[in-house]
Image (cartoon, rainbow, N blue to C red):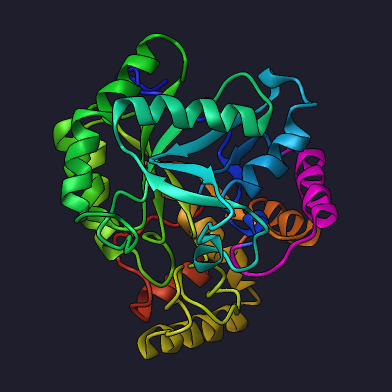
Amino acid sequence: MNSKGHYKPPFNFGMGGVPLGNEFEVVTDKDAYATIEAAWNAGVRYYDVAPWYGLGLAERRYGNFLYNQQRSQYILSTKVGKLLKASKTAQNKDYFPFSPSPNDVIYDYTAPGVRRSIEDSLQRLGIDSIDIVFVHDISPDNKYLPTPWSEQFEIARKGAFPELTRMREEGLIKGWGIGVNTPEPIMHLLEVADPDVCLLASQYSLIDHKNSLNQVFPAARAKNISFVIGSSLNAGFISGSPRYNYGKESYRIPAAFIEKRRKLLDVAANHGVDLRTAALQFSAAPDVACALVVGCKSEQQILADYTSMQTKIPAEFWADLKAQNLIEQNAPVPT
């Protein structure tokens, strides 16, 4: 809890569920379980999943491991707003071509929808409680919403938000917020509700951080709201993946981002720094960042990311980035 009673996860590093929902490629059950086990053995105790990730696949995989662990030993966040319904005519391959899920998605940001979603997640996970609930993708970048995002947000304002506040007061969850890829919903949420912590994805990275730094963070700081930072590598772009963030158009990478990555790599090489390591630490540095979650598809990836958070980076590297205007002058950097 912070000074205003808002919950924040007690662990500052977590593992995200996107890759093990087969978002980008096929990951076998064997490799998925080995990845989660490696994370646990390394000491990772915060896990972030969602019904959306592989349309149930990620929750089932994480649950298969976590239900055997003592529940008090880890923190888990999942998401609401997208109910899953199995169907022989499911359009699941339109969303996740690499997932074997039989489910369709039904958007539901109402109060009953929230309760239903949490119960469904508990059953898929095989556990008895969820710590943090994020209202998922209620955002202008979500092209699958049945009506404009502002209309869906209003449904959530009247339904999901007060219902999650009640569930927090009842002790059924510890905290709630929204999980989105754009700033507008977060700024609006801070005006109309009393969340604890939000998942800020794809918005605070070495490539793109100015708006969050100068607009979103001050607004959240004023309300004592913290952030779980996601996609600090922009869905792997910073570490060399052929995509930028998420969605069907993620392969269309703006030339300016490719050029910025090249410049960042040059500075990193000059200082003997691993750019992926620097990117992870940069995203975790702000005072409002209570945790960093990383998506990993293999044992090697999660162990490398975990190790990166313990690695020292010379102050001269960060100074050089600021000198070349590759990061904002007021951006906090690791010390």
Direction from residue 161 to residue 70 in the image, left or right: right
Residue ID at (45%, 87%)? 258
In this orientation, which residue lies closer to the viewer: 276 or 148? 148
Direction from residue 187 to residue 22 in the image, left or right: right
Q: State how many labels appear.
A: 0
- Is 88 magenta? The answer is no
Direction from residue 115 to residue 219 in the image, left or right: left
Identify the residue at the far top of this view: 170
Q: In which quarter of the image is the N terminus?
A: top left
Q: Where is residue 274 in the image (x, y as percent from the top left)?
A: 64, 72
Residue ID at (68%, 41%)? 60
Q: Where is residue 287 in the image (x, y as percent from the top left)?
A: 38, 42
Question: Most prominent secondary structure in the magenta stretch?
Answer: helix
Q: Can residue 291 be seen in this view?
A: no
- Is 36 magenta? The answer is yes
Compared to 74, does 102 lie above or below? Answer: below
Identify the residue at the far front of this view: 88
Compared to 271, does 60 lie above or below? Answer: above
Q: Position of residue 165 (x, y in %)?
A: 31, 20
In this orientation, which residue lies closer to the viewer: 270 or 57? 57
Q: Position of residue 300 (x, y in %)?
A: 79, 61
- Magenta residue span: 23-43
In this orientation, which residue lies closer to the viewer: 226 or 334? 226
**Residue 26, located in which quarter of the rendered image?**
bottom right
Compared to 236, does 29 lie above or below? Answer: above
**Residue 156, located in which quarter of the rendered image?**
top left
Q: Can residue 271 be seen in this view?
A: yes
Residue ID at (31%, 67%)? 328
Compared to 213, does 173 lie above or below? Answer: above
Residue ID at (51%, 43%)? 85
